[in-house]
Image (cartoon, rainbow, N blue to C red):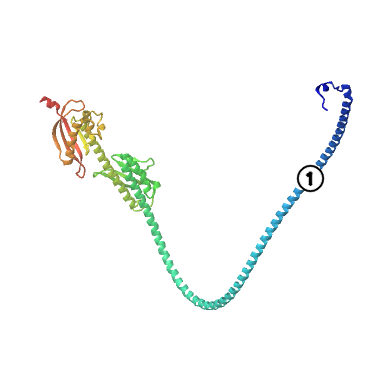
Amino acid sequence: MKKTGDEARHTKRPTVEELRPKRTRQLDAAYQQLRAREQQLKTACEQLRAHEQQLEAANKQLLAHEQQLESVNQQLGAANQQLQTHEQQLEAANQQLQAREQQLRAANQQLRAHEQQLEAANQQLQAREQQLRAANQQLRAHEQQLEAANQQLQAREQQLRAANQQLRAHDEQLRKANHDLAERIKDLNCLYGVASSVQKREGLDVIFHDVLSLIPAAWNYPHITRGKIRFDGQEYVLDSFQETRWKLTSDIVVAGRTRGSLEIYYLEQRPVLDEGPFLKEERNLINAVAQTLSEAAERKQAEQELARERNMLRTLIDNLPDFIYIKDSQSRFTACNAAVSDFMGAATPHELIGRTDFDFYPHEQASEYYADEQQVIRSGQGLVNKYEPNAGQTGKIRWIWTSKLPLRDSQGKVVGIVGISRDMTELKEAQ
């Protein structure tokens, strides 16, 4: 039966003192349980430690077993490799045995073939013996022929001895011809050197020195050969010259007059040949050299005379007051005197070379001059005494009297013009 609220409020509850023994009993019981639980835990821990030690020992045993297994596996692997190697060796040995069997079969076949060849060779030997018997008979016949051939050889040897004597004589002729050829080459080298000096050198003094240097090598005894040139009262020698009684001389003649001589000396006595100790070829050589020197002297004299005349002509032209000039087919100046260059405002005549009137005069005036010159070149007829004004470089009108004549080459072809002009201004103004 459910109590009401007032009844419940008035019901008496147990006090602390009443409740304490019960609580204590419960705590004691719980403590006893805890002590028992601790004892169980200690026992469990000891068991766990024992199990751990057992596990560690088991693990060590397992590791040892694993190492043993690995070693066994390695041994098994090595054994397998050895087994494979032995199998390969066995296979190779089987192949070699098979090849050997094939070789043996082939050798047997070759042996049978050799036996057949031996049989055939025996038959050939028998035939060869028969041939040798026949050959012996032929050899006896050949011996008889050789005896006859020996007799012919003896006769041939006598012919060869005679031919050898002829060859020796021919060789001697060849040696002499080679010697003569070498001497002629020396002569030609000397003449070429003299001609080259005459062509390239300017003065006769230098040419004479070159000739004296070239002469010894062309003579039969170069080491004792010396030379001297006399020309117009002067003597030309080298430092080692010495005059002796063994001498060869040739005159140097210019324009029909003897101007000097070329003299060759030997420093020592030599056997007498064609002309004293000298050969006739050396006489020809000295004459040829002297002739070349004569021609060179005549040419050099002509060149000097020509240069003197050219210098005189140039001096005359440059000092004339008239304008003198030469132009090519294109009306370009190739030569002129100082009067022309002064009138045209050039410092020297050389400044006009290669230039035209268009470079100095107005175009209209230069065109008129150009037309006149080209008409002379085309027609081959000169323009004489033309009277015309010229402004010059100053602009002042000058009256010029002009003549232009065709200039021809050696074949007669017109290659330019020669002009001469004179300033007539003062005369014009005086009129």
Above or below residue 410? Residue 281 is: below
Q: Is residue 267 visible?
A: no
Q: Which quadrant, please, contains the C terminus?
A: top left
Q: Which quadrant, please, contains the N terminus?
A: top right
In the rendered view, does 235 fall on the left or right side of 405? right
255 or 95, which is in the foreground?
95
Which amino acid, mark 1?
Answer: Leu
Label 1 crowding class (10 Å Cα cut-off): few <14, some 14-19, many 20+? few
Above or below residue 178? Residue 263 is: above
In the rendered view, does 301 fall on the left or right side of 269? left
Q: Which percent across, then down, holds residue 171?
A: 40, 60
In the rendered view, does 273 fall on the left or right side of 259? right
Q: Which residue is mark 1?
A: 62
Q: Is residue 109 visible?
A: yes
Q: List the single residue furthest toward the front.
A: 1
Above or below residue 349? Residue 267 is: below
96 or 289, which is in the foreground?
96
Q: Which percent across, then down, holds residue 78?
A: 72, 52
Q: Which percent across, then down, holds residue 203?
A: 31, 39
| Quarter location, residue 21 | top right
Q: Residue at x 31, y 51 (%)?
A: 284
| Quarter location, residue 239 | top left
